[in-house]
Image (cartoon, helix red, strand yellow):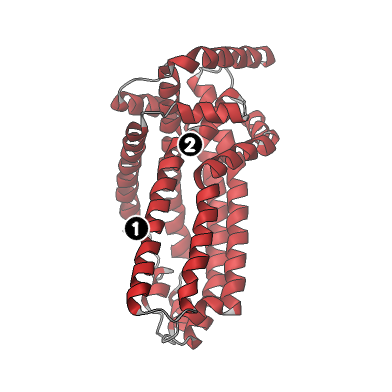
């Protein structure tokens, strides 16, 4: 199969793969997201975080919001939040690699799709794929993050120095300009690594050379990458939003965690929140919304893979190397079959 040149043709091509790979891709990801929804959404956020946060908000001095970030409970909560977030990401990686491997099978018309084999492939490549994620982090945010941290540390000096208001205003403005530039730079570099994991799994090569290849195929094509990815995200988001709102007519939660941010000054919020919470409605509504969201995310994975294949073929300097890698991988798979 050859990736189409025009974006609408690639969307159609992605849909063809999506129909064939629906069960193989949606079912595992849906199981992962449902586990995350129940464990992180209900147990961690609702039962743990909401109780602690509400107890803090109830006793917080709103005239000195800075004390909120120095509260031991907040520090502990932030640490736990980072810990659970890290677990969430680490659990996501095998499913992500499995999906790319399965998409590769369908893209190359594999005669046999083996769920167990592909999932074991993702587990066996866990350490190598972490190397690719490290390359991405180093390329996108390592040095900028260090500079950003140093700048914020210097910025906090004005809390301790008795500067005039004009100097504080200038310092504050410079800080926000630097923050904006940091975010813009990070987004630019992040988009250039959009295909790094795809390329690593696609060629079964987790070296720095392959990472550089995945970055180089976006050279002089940044806006094309941006608009292709943005377009597919907008289309999938709109369809998911319409479908989710349709289901919410029948299944809707009588309360949500958004009430937490809208009623921070309500001392009876915790009691109201717990008394009006309906586990059944929340779970059923979340079930359907999670299913719709999973379908959308799977389709995006397929489209990005097809788009990566198109860019890699257009990269004439590396096309021959890529073809050799693909031929060797296909031959080895046929031997195994």
What is the quadrant of residue 226 in the picture?
top left
Residue 258 falls in which quadrant of the image? Answer: bottom left
User: According to the image, label 1 marks what residue?
Assistant: 248
Q: Which residue is depicted at the point 34% across and 72% down?
A: 169
Tell whether 48 sits left or right of 248.
Answer: right
Q: Nearer the viewer, residue 126 or 61?
A: 61
Vertical position of residue 53 compared to residue 246: above or below: below
Assign the N terminus to one quadrant of the image: top left
Q: Quadrant of residue 236?
A: top left
Q: Which one is in front in this view, the residue at disc 2 or the one at disc 1?
A: 2
Up the image or down, 123 lies above or below 245; here it is: above
Picture residue at 69% right of the left edge, 38% below the top: 127
Circle 1 Cα neighbour tier, 10 Å, few/some/many (<14 / 14–19 / ≥20): some
Tell me where residue 322 appears, x and y as whole percent.
Answer: 53, 17
Residue under label 2, please give it.
193
Q: Nearer the viewer, residue 251 or 127?
A: 127
Q: Secondary structure at mark 2?
A: loop
Q: Left or right: 56 with respect to 231?
A: right
Report x, y in % for residue 171: 38, 68
Cα distance in 3D space between marks 2 and 1: 36 Å
| Sequence-earlier tag: 2 or 1 | 2
């Amino acid at each position: 199969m050859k990736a189409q040149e025009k974006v609408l043709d690639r969307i159609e091509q992605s849909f063809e793969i999506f129909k064939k790979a629906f069960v193989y891709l949606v079912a595992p990801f849906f199981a992962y997201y449902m586990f995350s929804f129940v464990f992180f959404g209900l147990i961690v956020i609702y039962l743990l975080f909401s109780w602690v946060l509400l107890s803090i908000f109830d006793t917080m001095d709103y005239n000195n919001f800075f004390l909120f970030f120095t509260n031991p409970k907040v520090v502990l909560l932030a640490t736990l939040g980072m810990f659970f977030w890290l677990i969430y990401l680490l659990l996501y990686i095998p499913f992500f690699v499995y999906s790319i491997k399965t998409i590769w099978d369908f893209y190359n018309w594999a005669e046999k799709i083996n769920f167990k084999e592909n999932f074991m492939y993702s587990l066996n490549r866990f350490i190598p794929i972490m190397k690719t994620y490290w390359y991405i982090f180093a390329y996108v945010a390592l040095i900028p993050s260090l500079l950003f941290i140093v700048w914020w540390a210097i910025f906090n000096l004005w809390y301790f120095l008795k500067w005039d208001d004009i100097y504080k205003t200038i310092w504050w403005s410079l800080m926000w300009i630097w923050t904006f530039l940091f975010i813009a730079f990070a987004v630019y570099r992040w988009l250039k690594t959009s295909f790094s994991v795809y390329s690593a799994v696609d060629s079964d090569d987790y070296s720095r050379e392959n990472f550089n290849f995945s970055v180089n195929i976006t050279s002089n094509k940044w806006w094309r990458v941006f608009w292709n990815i943005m377009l597919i995200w907008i289309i999938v988001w709109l369809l998911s939003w319409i479908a989710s709102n349709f289901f919410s007519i029948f299944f809707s939660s009588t309360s949500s965690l958004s009430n937490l941010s809208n009623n921070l000054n309500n001392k009876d919020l915790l009691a109201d929140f717990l008394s009006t919470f309906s586990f059944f409605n929340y779970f059923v509504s979340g079930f359907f919304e999670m299913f719709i969201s999973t379908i959308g995310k799977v389709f995006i994975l397929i489209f990005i893979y097809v788009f990566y294949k198109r860019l890699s073929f257009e990269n004439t300097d590396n096309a021959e190397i890529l073809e050799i890698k693909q031929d060797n991988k296909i031959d080895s798979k046929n031997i195994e079959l």
